[in-house]
Amino acid sequence: MAQSEEKEAVTNTEEHESNQLSEDQLSPDEEVTNVEENEDVNELIGLQQQLEEETNRHLRLRADYENFKRRTQLDREAADKYKAQSLLSNLLPVLDNFERAMQSLPASEDSQSLQKGLEMVYKTLVEATEKEGLQVIEAEGVAFDPNIHQAVMTDTDETKESGIILQELQKGFRYKDRVLRPSMVKVNE
């Protein structure tokens, strides 16, 4: 009986070992299926990465387009806001010449009618430019501001504080929030 038990144990061991070998080894069909599954997984991962890259690219392009639209809108608004700037800049010498002409006329009776005509034209021109947003920059008696004044001379007046404008030599003008021409001034030291 011992022999038959031994034989049975050997047979069980052999069967067990052969089952393990067959479990560890895959059939050729199973190997092909595993390789195909690995290729499918790799292809799926590649497609997911490509989708993420394209999505990011799309989002960046959309953001660039939105920024472009915003910049264009701001440029358009600025162009509309400052549309008269060039014209007003070209009219500044005309205003200066009118002022000089009115100051240089002699005080005779003949020149009074000419002076009145010049004053009427000057007043109309000033009103038209003010309607467009042109403003005179205040200068005499105020503190010097390098953003709106241009100091061309200095002088000493002990009755006034240092940095106060003593005299305006040429009018300065502002168009809305931009300085078209700074005032040329003489400043107290």
Image (tube, rainbow, N blue to C red):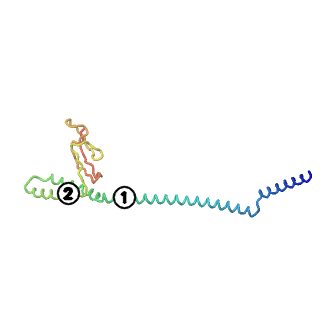
In-image side of 21 versus 79 (left or right): right
In-image side of 114 versus 149 (left or right): left
Q: Nearer the viewer, residue 80 or 69?
A: 69
Residue 127, numbered label: 2
In-image side of 12 versus 63 (left or right): right
The residue labelled by disc 1 is 75
Residue 17, x across and y down, in percent: 82, 54
Residue 92, x across and y down, in percent: 24, 55
In-image side of 124 versus 64 (left or right): left
Residue 67: quadrant of the picture: bottom left
Q: CA distance from mark 1 to mark 2?
A: 28 Å
Residue 155, x across and y down, in percent: 23, 39
Task: Identify the residue at image location x=76%, y=60%.
Answer: 26
Outermost residue, front side: 1
Outermost residue, top side: 158
Secondary element at image label 1: helix
Residue type at tag 2:
Glu
Mark 2 surroundings within 10 Å by alpha-carbon count, few (fewer than 14), some (14 through 19), many (20 or more): few
Secondary element at image label 2: helix
Q: Nearer the viewer, residue 34 or 74?
A: 34
Mark 1 surroundings within 10 Å by alpha-carbon count, few (fewer than 14), some (14 through 19), many (20 or more): few
Residue 39: quadrant of the picture: bottom right
Task: Identify the residue at image location x=20%, y=57%.
Answer: 127
Residue type at tag 1:
Asp
Counting residues from the N terminus, which is met first, the one under dot 1 or under dot 2?
1
